[in-house]
Amino acid sequence: MSYDLIMQQALKFHNEGKLDEAERLYRKILETSPHHPVILNLLGLIAQSKSLHLEAADCFSRAIAQSPQTAEYYFNLAWSLERCHKAAEAIEYYHRALQLQPDIKEAHNALGNLYLAAGRREQAQDQFNKAALLEPGYVEPRANLAKMNQDLPALQKLQSQYPHEALIPYYISLLQRQSGQTASALESAQLAYNLQQDEQTALLVGELYLEQQQSDRAEPYFRRALFLNPKSVSALINLANREPDPATAEKMYKQALDLSPQNIDAHINYADLLYRQKRLHEALEEYRQAVILDPEKPEVSNNLGIIQKDFGEYEEALGLFFNALLQQPDRKEYALNIAETLMLLYEKTPEEAQKIARNWLKKTPDNIFARRLNEIFDHTDGESGKEYVQKLFDLFADNYEEVMQRLDYRLPQIIADKLGPIEGHIIDLGCGTGLTGAALKNPRNSLTGIDISSAMLEKARQKKIYDRLEEADIADCCRHLPPADMVVAADVFGYFGALDEIIPLIFPRNFCFSIAADDTTESWRLMPNGRFRHNPAYVKKLLQKAGYSNITEHPAILRRENGEDVNGFVFIAKEK
């Protein structure tokens, strides 16, 4: 077959989208004409279409070497360099293309985007304006200008003029999302997606569904983004975050990191997965990589601190937690991590822990966790206990049951076993996420749950086992308790010192509750972990004084803390 016929057939394949067949014929031509610039350029375009931009850039560079006055080759090279994240080189080659052919509107627009990404707004605006002037109907630079200036009305005006341009509602969605208008942003993103199903728009729709807590609706868009671009790092990370199978999720994170080794989100989320699997050394390494990439990111410092705390490196963990809190003082979970770590340090070196705690309180006197910690270290019940418990469990709600499972928390089932099937009305004091309620619920009873934490109550509500839920302080609500066949308080009195006022308020209702046992002669004692332990004799005496005559106490292992059993008692008290 002659050269002309091979070329004609190759171009036909190319135009029909049969890229592998076209490439095979182009390479056949190169065997006899290895420096043919047109063929090299066409091979570069095929590589571009396959997202093989390094290979494409090599083809375009070779074409330029043979034909240095062809603007198209410089433009194509710049386009591939831009996608290889080589911004400076891309800018250079776009300019060289424009020197040869000043009316390439796409080059001006691309330069505008590159300058904008580099923070060079004036140069970006100049390039967008040049692109728009070259062709008034060229919408993209006008949309880019409006987005750059965060001019939502200008974008909305463009949308009315060009209702079929997907880029405009995409940009509108970004600005709406930025201003917190999530519902409007989702609507705009859906419009953009309906007009053009590309990777970035699919990702945006998925992320906006996540922000609306609609994970199930988000997933198909992430899968679509991955279908459109099998190398989509964002799609891989988002799908891995929601993948129930840890092995599959790990494979996705590794694939994302192979594609983008500097992606901090991939490192953080992969580290979180490793941590949940108790692969602490591997998780530590991933978090360290994230710190290297962005030492100022507070969540990375916090997560790295959690690992160090698990390793018993308390002072190093505290440094990381304080660094995170300094950058985001309103993040209560960072303050809670500091408090918990100082409690652990207190058991090892009390004086050092107290010194750090006092300094923390001095610098942030309004921080509830710093205040409560100093009360604990000073062995006083203090005034901040109620607020501390509320904040603690609001933060704890999302992973409460997972943590309690790790602590081998047995109390709900122990109580259910001791009480047997209960008929009538049960009041669950400190119901939390509803673990005890779930253990006691049967078709012959009704449940009222009371808790100080709105976040915990929301988790309990989702179980749909309670007939009524009330947000209240237990000490206050006990003053007006309705009639009940049984009142339960599982793992509640660990947050109360003296029980002299509460127990009489519950009489004469049947009462089942737990205490962590204290083996000293004191009635109750505030422990360094911020929880109270009670003397069983003190508790039994209070029950008798309140009027209970039928009292049984059952020794029980309530849970494990720091690798040791927490021993306690389950009391069942009845009037007769």
Image: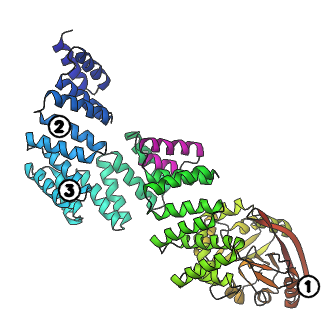
User: Which residue is at 26% across, 16% downward?
Assistant: 28
Span of residues in magenta = 234-262
| Residue 257 counted in the magenta span | yes
The answer to whether residue 457 shows anywhere in this view is: no
* 145 relative position to 436: left or right: left
> In the image, residue 143 lies at what x, y percent?
20, 56
| Residue denoted by label 3 | 143
Task: Please name which of the two marks, 3 or 1, marks the residue nearer to the observer.
Answer: 3
Residue type pointed to by label 1: Ser
Mark pair 3, 1: CA separation = 80 Å
- Which quadrant would residue 150 be assigned to in this image? bottom left
Q: Residue 74: give its label.
A: 2
Secondary element at tag 3: helix
Residue type pointed to by label 2: Tyr
Q: Residue 436: give its label.
A: none
- The answer to whether 461 is drawn above or below residue 219 in the figure is below
- The answer to whether 159 is drawn above or below residue 339 in the figure is above
